[in-house]
Amino acid sequence: MKSISDIIRDVSKCNRCGNCQYYCPSFNVSRRESHVARGKLQLIRKNLEEGSVYSDTFVKRVEQCLLCGNCSQNCPAGLCTEDIMEDIRELCVAQAGPSKAMAMTAANIAEVGNITGDVRENRLLWMENLEPGSVRVGEQAENLFFAGCVSTLYPSSYAIPQTFSKLMNKAGQDWAVIGKDESCCGYPLIIGGMAESAKSVMEQNIREVVKSGARRLITTCPSCYHVWKEVYPHAAQDMPDIEIYHATEFIEKLVREGALWFNESSCTVTFHDSCDLGRKGGVFEEPRDTLRAIPGVNLVEMKFHHENAFCCGGGGNLEMNDSALSGDIAKQRVKQAQDAGAEIIVTSCQQCKRTLTGGARQMRARIKVMDISEFIFERVNNNADS
């Protein structure tokens, strides 16, 4: 954990230019200085210098950051705001304890290995509508599908692992899932200031990956992808030599190799870059290349896209801490898709799908939100008989 003096040194680099305002999704909907990096960094500096770290207002402002990173990559002073926010969250937890919501999430992960508190067996419920035997559970395979908490425990997200599974089978891949013994990747704990608490579930997951004998780990969740690729190798012991793929990368590989091909589909779509897959993972073109490979699909870009894409509103545990702000940001992103002329928002993240769908519903917007696995499967050649 960083010292208070180190954090003060980091935030002092802010030159207060205000460039972050243009790129901050939160500021663009609220117009509140306390929601943008410049305001948060000055608040952090003031509170740390005065020793008043624990005020409820201060903690609330810290927890309202999306950790999306859009301000950081456009910061003239070169600050990495999301790293600073993670440091200060860790300090707040260490000195004042976690928030009620964060404490409950941490307890659920510690007790049953997931964010919801569901019994472990519920991780298998998404498979019930699939053909018996179409998903191999707990077996050795070349490819291991790490499904994640949201996709397996929120019924509204079941379609994501279901359609990805069908794509893997259609492409003739050797693959399996961990099943009930899969645990949360640890990301909610890491960004909630409880990185130490994440180590036990990380080690549990590594044991399951080693047991599977897999050469590749594939996930449909950008946060799981980010943690497995960037955090596990440095924070966990005995990390196996395994390739890490997000589903968008693996699907693009299958299309490029001729394992999947498509029927014509006339529609106008826009691709929403998830923060963890795009800015943090550097995956931008693979999903777009796949969409362009579908005859008849017209791909348009929103005003903010690729490296500058706006967050959906679901990042940084914001939905847990300020659901109203999260919802307003989601509606802002849906409006950007409408302005681009899209009929369908295609994304690559179950959380993005949830928040954007909620935003569209609140707006009564005539626009559909789909995960890329769903969108691709509907257009795979002769998929009706699968």
Image (tube, rainbow, N blue to C red):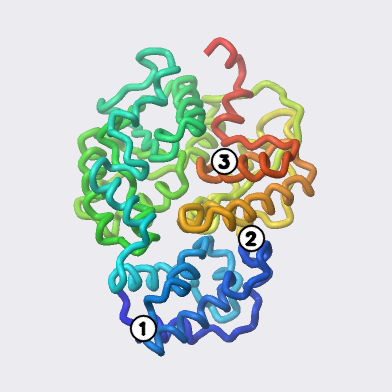
**237 relative position to 322: left or right:** left
| Res 6 label | 1
Residue position for label 2: 308
Mark 2 or mark 1, earlier in chain: 1
Q: Nearer the viewer, residue 147 or 50?
A: 50
Mark 1 or mark 3, earlier in chain: 1
Q: Which residue lies furthest to the bottom in this view?
A: 50
Position of residue 21 relative to residue 264, above or below, is below
Please count the marks in the image.
3
Residue position for label 3: 353
Quadrant in which residue 24 is drawn: bottom right
In space, the residues marked 1 and 3 are separated at their CA atoms by: 37 Å
Asked which secondary structure carries label 1, the reply is helix
Give x and y (percent) for residue 89: 38, 68
Quadrant in which residue 205 is drawn: top left
**281 relative position to 136: left or right:** right
User: At label 3, which amino acid type do we have?
Assistant: Lys
